[in-house]
Structure formats: C-alpha cells, structure tokens
Image (cartoon, helix red, strand yellow):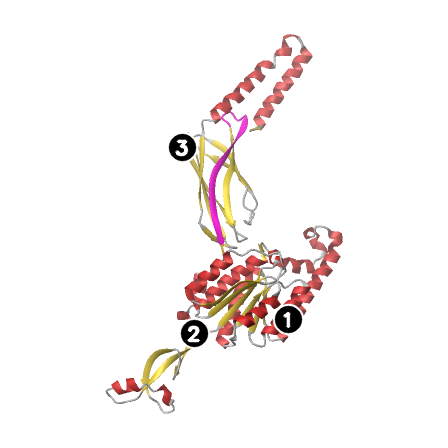
Amino acid sequence: MSLSARFMLLAMLIGVLAISGIWLGGTWAQAWLLPAGLLLALLWLEHTLSQRYQFSLQRQMPDTVELGRSFTQIYRLSVAPARRFEVELAEALPDSLHRPDWQLPMQITELKEASAELVFERVFEAVELAVLEFDALELRYLGVFGLCSWRRRLSAPARIRVVPQSLTQAERRQFTRESGDVAQRRSGHGLELIAHRDYQPGDPNRSIDWKASAKNVNGELKVRVMSDDQNLEIAILLDVGRRSKLATGAMRRLDHHVNLASRLTQAALGEGDTLHLLIYADTRIQELTNLRGAAGIRSVHQSLARLAPMAAIGDPVVAAYALLQRVPRRCLAVFMSDTESPDAMQALLRANALLRRKHLPLVVWLRDKALAELASYQGANQSKIDAPWHAPAQQLAALEILQSERDLRRQLRGLGVVVVDAEPEHLDAKVLSAYSQIRKRKAV
C-alpha cells in the first residue's frame, strides 16, 4: 500500500491541530485525537472494503512472433463488483523486447453489469531469438475513500516463441518457380519433356522423338522440346562467433543475419535452387547440405531458431575450407560474418580469396548507423556523446574503422567478390535483389 495525497493532507491538518492544541493548552491539547482516530478508522475500513474486490487479467497474443517485427498484446482487466476505479498498471517485460517496462494510469468506469472490464493493448517488438516469458502485472488502485493506493499482483503467465522472419506475400510471389523464368525451352536433351513440335531444318537428329513420329498420322517427324533448368546452388556461411552478439541498431548482428538467412533460404528454395547452410565459429558448428523445397525450408528454419552467439571468435577461413570440401560444384557462397575488427577483415579477405577460384562469393556487409554518425560528429551534436571531451578521439577511431572497411570492400571487389553493404533496414532487400540479378545473369 501507499498513502495518497488526500491522506497526507488530512494527516497534516491533524498535525496542525495538535500543535495548535499544545499551544492553547487545556482541553484543546487532546482535540486532535478524535480526527486522528477517525482517519485511522477510515483507513482500516477502506482496507477491509478493498479486499472484497476481485480482479482478473487475461492476455491475448500470438503463439509465435517473427524476429524484428512488431506484435500486439491485448489485455483484458476485469473487476467485480463493479464500481468506478482509478487504477495504475505496470509490467516488467522480458529483456528480448524492444520496449522498456511500462506503467500506465487508467480508469475503469462504472458499468451496470455485475463486473467491469477494461480492454487495452500494447505493441511490442521482439529483438532477439528467445522464448518470451510473461508472468504477472502489478496493479495499484485507489481505495473507496481515496486514502490509500492498494496493490495487487495479477498472475497471467504466457509464452511466445520468437522465430526468424519469413518472406512477405509479395516476396513469395516474386521468388517462386511459377512467377519467374527459371527454365529455358530447348530442343534436344534436357531435364523434363515439355512438348513436341514439328521437325524444322537445322534441328539436331538427337532431338527427334522417333516413337512420337511413328504415331503421327501425317508422317511428319516430331522433335522433343525439353526444359533446361537454370537452377543454381547457394551456400550460406553464417558466423555465430562472440562478435555476432554485438548490437547493430535495435538487434544483435546475429539476429539480423538469421532473418536474412531465413528469407534468402525461402527465396532460393522457392526458385528451385539447391541450398547448403554452414554455421561456424572457430570450428564448424553445423552443416546442412543439398536442401530443396519445403522440407529444406523447415530444416533451415529450425536450425536458425536455435542459434545463439558462441564464446569463440568466428573464423571465416574455416568455413571456406569446409565449403570447398563439401560442395564440389560451383555455387554462390554468401558470407554473413564480422566485418568490423581488423583481424576479422583480414580473415574474411583470405577466405574469399580461397573461394573465388571455384565459387562466386557474396559478402553481406552490415553497416552500423551509429558508427557513421560518430564519424560525422559535429559540435552541435554533443548531446549524442556521453563524454564530449573524448569526442575527437572517438571520431578519429570511427573514421579509421570506416576507412578500413572501405579498403576491404575495395579489395574484395577487386577479387571478383560481390559485396552488398547496407544499413539493417535495407540489407535484406539489397541482398535479395543481388541474388535475383545473379540468377538472371546466370553468373554461377
């Protein structure tokens, strides 16, 4: 319980009355006891009456939410018997939500029914792969006489599982076999028979379907039209080393990469491509090879949903050697790795130098907006720096890091590596666009 402003005011007036009585003396010296006793009696009565109210809380929320996307939680607070209540609610939220603990003053208006209900909602955003545990809310309500705020703990346990993002409906329509040119029609040998047509001068003899020609009543030769699929192989090399837990924007670097890997997997397997997933730190953590179709999407999704940063430092050279051993055919190798520390930059350069001889490497470069803001620090932005007298040193360090990143990107592109660099909110779209262009160019 906590005493209200009304109680404190009445207590202060009783105190003034007591002091005045002491000064006046006589019968006035005991005059304050009556109002003080009455105030305490009212407080006890308010406590007794407050115990008869029954509060209940219900939550409505999805069972799963996608990482980095918002979801709505609906609260239903009811009280019986009904009366006008001034209430204040507060909840301590899981650390994996991008929202501080909230506290909200509200009012339950009196209803004619036996109970009153207050419905409200809150929007949250899950910023980390986790199982979100919601337990209880703290309720504080003003008593009947307004003397004290009484507390209740309302239990409403709930669990939500955070899963990697999926493609939107528009993206699913874009990355499906039916919506794109994933096969060419050619006469002769191929993977699948599409149709027959009449023989034309110049058609190779091996393209003639002699059985179909024999069944033709006109006696004309028939040529097989076969599909020549332009499917490619794609390998995702995902770094779960300890630097992957560093934050870039609202989420960890690992969570950005998990979302991208999930969406890229859906796009690639939706196009009929073959996918390999290699998760690594200082050693190979997990390998999934030759994945296709809906089963492949489910396997990747389940693996990504269980990921967490490791204690070791990620080594992309280890991943490059593993890919060369596991995938003998040329493929698109997508690196999702640390690109900030000098050692990681050099290791990434060596790894891509190894891969480019056989595969087409693509490096996903996650730009840090906070680093760019620090590098462009001006005196007017001092409020963004915790210690302004250290700003020149911080700015110099940020400029040096950005210059090192530009140099590495230039070296990678010089090796023939595709580098896709963007801030978190634009990264997925740029990588998916680059993948689509590589398919159209048949670069792999």
Does the rendering let one see residue 175?
Answer: no
Marks 2/3 in contact by CB < 8 Å: the verdict is no
- Which residue type carries mark 3? Ser
Q: From where the camera sits, is residue 36 visible?
A: yes
Element class at badge 2: loop
Choose mark 2 or mark 3, whichever is in front: 2
Residue 80: % across, % down: 42, 31
Q: Nearer the viewer, mark 1 or mark 2?
A: 1
Answer with mark 2 or mark 3, whichever residue precedes in sequence: 3
Question: How far across and down, in percent of the image, does residue 273 sit?
Answer: 46, 70
In space, the residues marked 2 and 3 are separated at their CA atoms by: 62 Å
Residue reaching furthest to the top: 26
Residue toward you, 121 or 288: 288
Q: Earlier in the sequence, mark 1 or mark 2?
A: 2
Residue at numbered disc 2: 182
Residue 348's x, y, as percent?
63, 68
**Nearer to us in this view, 81 or 95:** 95
Residue matched to label 3: 115
Q: What is the x, y in percent for residue 292?
A: 44, 67
Q: Which amino acid does label 2 sit on?
A: Val
Q: What element carries label 3?
A: loop
Q: Which amino acid does label 1 sit on?
A: Arg
Badge 1 element: helix
